[in-house]
Image (cartoon, grey):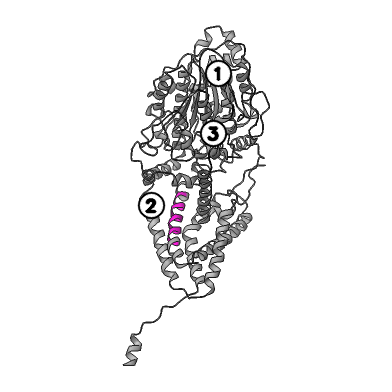
């Protein structure tokens, strides 16, 4: 009887040391989540094999040890492990999905895009591939919880785990961009920590109203001033034919008088939530604190009696952009129905602009925030603007899901010609929109500035979309200024200063100071050395704002004015002449300077009243070309615009690889 009872007695499950269980989970986690990212990053690097092997080995060992320490630290308490380990696997799966699918760069800004999106917007990212990844991660999470139940009870485990946990938290908190931030889970943990610290600082900081500084405006002429800022989206300056691009993407702009083009301009950031506030505040690429601590130039214009309008085809999901938009007297966001609603076109802003311009009894500031060249490129423009073919498939569904987006990106990436053509057509449409904006400002005392928030990757190094801090093509943006004849007549000194500086490298850093200074505003927040409307030599891009007020410029003598024939193309349909290839003008049309005016005078009084017609003869269209990041064009412009040495570095902030000499 006793023997039978002994046989029926259950065997006790075999127990294992906690370190052995964590080692097993580290191996599984690294194989599933880290290895794909590791291979992807090192495949994109072109360097000697011995150097690559040595660096890869060092990074692999360091990353494995860091993951082991993190997981061991999570076992400090059973409840901590049961909650955090499954969450860690789920968030890793999401992060890896974005990195492997979109080649996205994990940063505090990408975390902000996810966290500050609405639930409806986030639902668009659900698809079968992501759901499978999440279920797999959850399975691993449950397996890890069950394994820890098989550990031996050892008294020193708690002390060791507590110490390792504290060290791990310290590594994540003070991480300054070292190797570990490139691989999971430290990439998204560090990014999330940085975002949390940034958000906490923002919420605890009271934004200083810059309009409280003593400011004044020096008005000239009989008509009130109209200032229009057009903010583009994902537009690369090197895809504008006015900047030398081989395909004719800016035929209207190239025919415009009174236009000053800055060919060599770099962006403040690679995300809209950073670049747009950086453009409109005193923030610079080197010091972005003003984005969170101060109001924008809208508040200053408003305090000086300007009617202020924010008109956008994009919705606002990010702080502090939302707060800046709310500084305007009137704001109208058309894209509030669906995130990246492909039924919204930038031409829908034109009637809103017309309404804002109806009352000319007081000065006006209008900010147009466009969709520009945001993916999906073929949905950014009407069919009449499909000049360059073949193109990517166009999706106009109001319920635009990420599964479709992924399919489209992959289809276009395998046919790079279609991808670039679709992108270039969106630039062509932007050219038309900008021409329509300038047409509406003719006959007024008006100043207009256009730039894009950031550039875009079109397959360089396997990258697509944007968000890559180290990618040169993400920082190359267009920028030009246009003024009406009356503005130039009333402000010849400012205009002359601006036209002389277009040969210099520029950046978003100068826009805040230049817009205010060119508008005749005097305020202590303006740094004259960063103003394009001053003759003072340009300062370093990282110069701080001057604490001294700008001296008031005396009313200048008038100058002969140029007139420009209005553009008659309707907003929804491309003019027939736009369909013909346009030959570039013999002389540069970047500026409306004295040389252009002298040429006009020689041609007679009627020459100024007619716009140069597009050429009727077909011009041989060159094959679309995507600038590879190894091409000198990108590297020279990107680094000269930033006043840095001509050295590009790979591996983000990790292994330094000198790519140019």
Counting every numbered tag in the picture gives: 3
Give the label on residue 142, or none.
Answer: none
The earlier-in-sequence mark between 2 and 3 is 2
Query: x, y (%) of residue 650?
Result: 59, 47
Name the foreground residue: 619 vs 404: 404
Residue depth check, mark 2 versus mark 1: number of the one nearer the observer: 1
In the rendered image, residue 334 lying in the magenta stretch gets the answer no
Judge from the rendering whether residue 289 lies leftward or rightward of residue 575; answer left or right. right
Mark 3, Cα crowd under 10 Å, few <14 / some 14-19 / many 20+, is some
Q: Secondary structure at mark 3?
A: loop
Residue 486 drawn at (x, y percent): 54, 14
Q: Helix, strand, or loop for circle 1?
A: loop
Residue under numbered circle 3: 209
User: Quick one: 586 or 148, which is closer to the camera?
Assistant: 148
Q: Main secondary structure of the magenta part?
A: helix
Residue at numbered disc 1:
258
Which residue does the numbered mark 2 point to in the structure image?
Answer: 129
């Amino acid at each position: 009887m006793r023997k039978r009872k002994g046989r029926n007695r259950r065997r006790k499950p075999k127990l294992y040391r906690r370190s052995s269980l964590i080692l097993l989970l580290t191996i599984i986690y690294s194989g599933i989540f880290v290895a794909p990212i590791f291979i992807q990053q090192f495949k994109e690097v072109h360097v000697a094999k011995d150097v690559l092997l040595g660096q890869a080995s060092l990074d692999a060992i360091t990353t494995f040890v860091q993951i082991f320490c993190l997981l061991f630290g999570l076992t400090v308490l059973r409840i901590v492990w049961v909650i955090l380990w499954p969450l860690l696997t789920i968030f890793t799966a999401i992060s890896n999905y974005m990195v492997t699918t979109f080649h996205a760069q994990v940063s505090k800004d990408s975390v902000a895009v996810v966290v500050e999106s609405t639930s409806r917007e986030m639902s668009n990212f659900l698809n079968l591939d992501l759901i499978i990844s999440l279920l797999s991660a959850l399975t691993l999470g449950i397996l890890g919880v069950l394994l820890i139940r098989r550990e031996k009870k050892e008294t020193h485990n708690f002390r060791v785990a507590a110490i390792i946990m504290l060290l791990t938290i310290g590594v994540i908190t003070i991480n300054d961009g070292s190797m570990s931030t490139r691989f999971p889970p430290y990439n998204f943990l560090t990014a999330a920590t940085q975002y949390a610290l940034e958000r906490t600082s923002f919420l605890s900081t009271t934004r200083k109203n810059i309009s409280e500084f003593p400011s004044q405006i020096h008005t000239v002429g009989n008509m009130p001033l109209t200032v229009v800022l057009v903010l583009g989206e994902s537009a690369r300056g090197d895809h504008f034919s006015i900047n030398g691009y081989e395909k004719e993407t800016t035929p209207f702009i190239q025919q415009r008088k009174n236009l000053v083009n800055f060919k060599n301009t770099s962006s403040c950031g690679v995300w809209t939530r950073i670049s747009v506030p950086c453009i409109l505040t005193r923030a610079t690429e080197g010091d972005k604190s003003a984005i969170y601590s101060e109001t924008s130039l809208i508040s200053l214009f408003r305090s000086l009696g300007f009617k202020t309008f924010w008109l956008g085809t994009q919705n606002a999901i990010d702080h502090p952009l939302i707060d800046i938009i709310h500084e305007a007297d009137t704001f109208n966001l058309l894209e509030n129905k669906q995130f990246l609603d492909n039924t919204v076109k930038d031409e829908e802003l034109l009637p809103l602009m017309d309404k804002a311009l109806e009352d000319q009894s007081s000065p006006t500031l209008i900010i147009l925030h466009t969709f520009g060249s945001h993916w999906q490129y073929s949905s950014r423009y009407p069919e009449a603007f499909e000049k360059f073919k073949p193109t990517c498939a166009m999706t106009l569904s109001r319920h635009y899901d990420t599964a479709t987006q992924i399919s489209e990106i992959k289809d276009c990436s395998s046919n790079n010609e279609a991808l670039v053509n679709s992108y270039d057509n969106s630039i062509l449409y932007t050219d038309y929109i900008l021409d329509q904006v300038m047409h509406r400002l003719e006959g007024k005392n008006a100043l207009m500035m256009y730039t894009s928030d950031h550039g875009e990757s079109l397959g360089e190094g396997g990258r697509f979309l944007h968000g890559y801090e180290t990618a040169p093509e993400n920082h190359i943006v267009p920028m030009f200024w246009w003024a009406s004849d009356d503005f130039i007549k009333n402000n010849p000194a400012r205009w002359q200063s601006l036209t002389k500086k277009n040969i210099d490298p520029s950046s978003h850093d100068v826009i805040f100071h230049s817009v205010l200074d060119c508008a005749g505003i005097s305020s202590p927040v303006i740094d004259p050395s960063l103003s394009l409307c001053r003759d003072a030599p340009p300062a370093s891009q990282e110069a701080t704002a001057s604490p001294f007020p700008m001296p008031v410029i005396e009313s200048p003598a008038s100058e002969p004015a140029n007139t420009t024939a209005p553009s008659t193309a309707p907003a929804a349909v491309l003019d027939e002449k736009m369909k013909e290839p346009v030959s570039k003008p013999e002389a540069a049309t970047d500026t409306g300077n004295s040389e252009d005016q002298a040429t006009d005078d020689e041609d007679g009084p009627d020459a100024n009243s007619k716009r140069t017609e597009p050429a009727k003869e077909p011009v041989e269209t060159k094959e679309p070309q995507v600038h590879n990041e190894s091409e000198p064009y990108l590297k020279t412009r990107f680094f000269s615009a930033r006043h840095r040495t001509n050295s590009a570095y790979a591996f983000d902030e990790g292994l330094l690889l000198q790519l140019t000499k």
